[in-house]
Image (cartoon, grey):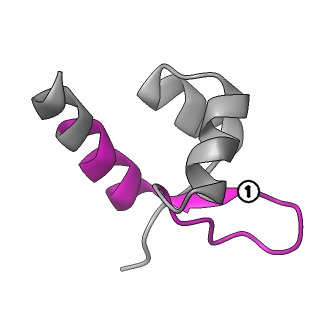
């Protein structure tokens, strides 16, 4: 079973953050960019884990 990959817009909607914020998260290694070159792509499981973690922190 392959893991679902999300693009920048999808992650922005899930996390309710701007694309600029998601780019910063990727730059600061808070989310792992699995895309090639300038294309930002993220593993759905990691994004959902980050969402749960951020909810716990408030």
Q: Is residue 15 left or right of residue 57?
A: right
Find the residue positioned furthest to the front: 28
Note whether 42 is above or below 50 in the view shown: below
Q: Residue at x 81, y 75 (%)?
A: 36
Q: Nearer the viewer, residue 41 or 1?
A: 41
Q: Is residue 42 left or right of residue 37?
A: left
Judging by the rendered image, the residue that carries numbered circle 1 is 40
Q: Nearer the viewer, residue 13 or 24?
A: 24
Which residues are the magenta region? 31-52
Q: Position of residue 8 (x, y in %)?
A: 68, 42
Instruction: Sort mark 1 into few (<14), some (14-19) or many (20+) by Cα contacts within 10 Å.
Output: some
Q: Position of residue 29 (x, y in %)?
A: 52, 62
Quadrant in the picture for residue 20 = top right
* Magenta stretch: includes residue 34: yes
Find the residue positioned furthest to the left: 56
Q: Position of residue 9 (x, y in %)?
A: 68, 33
């Amino acid at each position: 079973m392959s893991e679902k990959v999300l693009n920048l817009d999808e992650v922005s909607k899930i996390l309710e953050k701007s694309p600029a914020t998601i780019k910063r998260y990727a730059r600061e290694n808070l989310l792992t960019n699995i895309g090639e070159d300038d294309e930002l792509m993220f593993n759905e499981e990691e994004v959902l884990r980050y969402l749960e973690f951020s909810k716990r922190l408030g």
